[in-house]
Amino acid sequence: EPEVTQTPSHQVTQMGQEVILRCVPISNHLYFYWYRQILGQKVEFLVSFYNNEISEKSEIFDDQFSVERPDGSNFTLKIRSTKLEDSAMYFCASSGQGTTSGEQYFGPGTRLTVT
Amino acid sequence: RKEVEQDPGPFNVPEGATVAFNCTYSNSASQSFFWYRQDCRKEPKLLMSVYSSGNEDGRFTAQLNRASQYISLLIRDSKLSDSATYLCVVNMGSGGSYIPTFGRGTSLIVHP
């Protein structure tokens, strides 16, 4: 069964450093998403991406964040200068259809710890 | 503020019980609705979409009430493996611009 994969599973970084989280969506999906979940809190939408551009983004997704699809398979989330409050689980998801109807499939997540 | 609200629980039920969860949403223009389950420190996994006519998948039944702006999930004949947090997800927005909005989840514990 096709699945979304994410690397690394755990990333520890110092405050102010840049991190890149990587995702490989399901191969025939066209819509891609990043979410974060701070420990003990709800899953929060960050950004959606379709046709090589951002479709939607939340208030959390400020200038410190960027996304890219550098090749035909990877989808990345970059945090330019990490803050302590960026510590969270980051989930990538993909969908064959857009948010008006699409069911999303999540990767296992990257746990980001900022010290 | 546009939100999705769920009773956090936990719902503590014996094996074989029937349990129901509700979820309310604030934006009447919301387009699509889903239930996911999330095990501790794992990713959300899609359980089922929720259609206006209601839908069933084995022991799971989902209903949508647009007039009252809530969706429900019914689990029949609960199994130990059903223990998890159940997340309600609503695509909220309008005019072709929708953002997936998660509830905080309802915790279910099924005991022997």
Image (cartoon, rainbow, N blue to C red):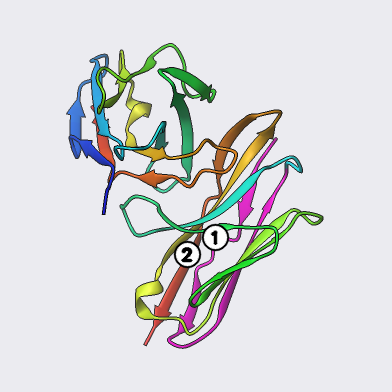
Chain for disc number 2: B
Disc 2 element = strand
Residue A91 found in image quarter: top left
Residue A19 percent coordinates (x, y): 24, 20
Q: Measured along the vertical axis of the image, is residue B87 above or below residue B82?
A: above
Q: Nearer the viewer, residue A112 or A24?
A: A24
Q: What's the mark number on residue B8?
A: 1
Q: Are marks 1 and 2 on the same chain?
A: yes
- Residue B79 appears left or right of B66: left
Residue A36 found in image quarter: top left
**Badge 2, how many Cα within 10 Å: few under 14, some, many 20+?**
many
Q: Nearer the viewer, residue B46 or B105?
A: B46
Q: Earlier in the sequence, mark 1 or mark 2?
A: 1
Q: Would you say residue A18 sits in the magenta stretch? A: no
List the residue tagged with mark 2.
B107
- Residue B94 appears left or right of A106: right
| Part of the protein shown in magenta | B1-26
Quadrant holding the N terminus of chain B: top right
Which amino acid type corresponds to the residue marked 1 in the rendered image? Pro
Residue B78 found in image quarter: bottom left
Residue B77 visible to the viewer:
yes
Given contact means CB atoms under 8 Å apart, are the residues at marks 1 and 2 in contact? yes
Residue at the image position 33 percent from the left and 21 percent from the top: A83
